[in-house]
Amino acid sequence: MQLERILHVDDDEDIRTIVQIALETIGQFELRQCSDGQSAVAEAQDFGPQLLLLDVMMPEMSGQEVRVAIGDLPGMDKVETVFVTAKAEDDFARELRAQGALAVITKPFDPMTLADQLRTIWQKAQ
């Protein structure tokens, strides 16, 4: 199955803008973006993402908490997750993967290659 729909959650407006250009304009994905975990949980079922692209450190709900909350929604338990974080320690990335993340992308990332990077991660998981 080809990756088409991505739900991106990041509290930083500049990052959301960069990701929108990288994934919609360059990558041609169907993208829905949210600035916080609560709105992401509210949007998830309606949008039906194949992949969650989640910032780790956000106010109120962390990326991990958003992932769990969306996974608890009916029919959303199989949605794959890629985390984006500035916290690049190997142990932390390993812990996120152990919790079920497909991958961890470190900020700053290259917006020109982000779409291809996500496609590669997705294809390896299928």
Image: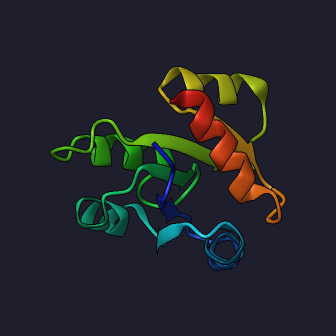
Residue drawn at (48%, 27%) of the image: 100
Q: Is residue 107 above or below residue 105?
A: below
Instruction: Place residue 47 in its image quadrant.
Output: bottom left
Residue drawn at (29%, 46%) of the image: 69
Residue drawn at (48%, 69%) of the image: 30
Q: Is residue 13 left or right of residue 52?
A: right
Q: Residue furthest front?
A: 1
Q: Quadrant of the N terminus?
A: top left
Residue 18: percent from left, percent from top: 72, 74
Front one among 97 and 91: 97
Q: Is residue 118 left or right of residue 109?
A: left
Residue 32: percent from left, percent from top: 45, 71
Using the rendered image of the protein, determine whether residue 49 is visible from the camera's viewpoint.
yes
Q: Which coloring applies here?
A: rainbow
Residue drawn at (30%, 58%) of the image: 48
Instruction: Place residue 91 in its image quadrant.
Output: top right
Front one among 93 and 22: 22
Q: Is residue 31 left or right of residue 92?
A: left
Residue 7: percent from left, percent from top: 45, 61
How many labels, in total? 0
Instruction: Place residue 13 in its image quadrant.
Output: bottom right
Q: Is residue 43 above or below residue 118?
A: below
Front one among 6 and 34: 6
Q: Is residue 93 above or below residue 66?
A: above
Residue 88: percent from left, percent from top: 78, 38
Using the rendered image of the protein, determine whether residue 96 is visible from the camera's viewpoint.
no
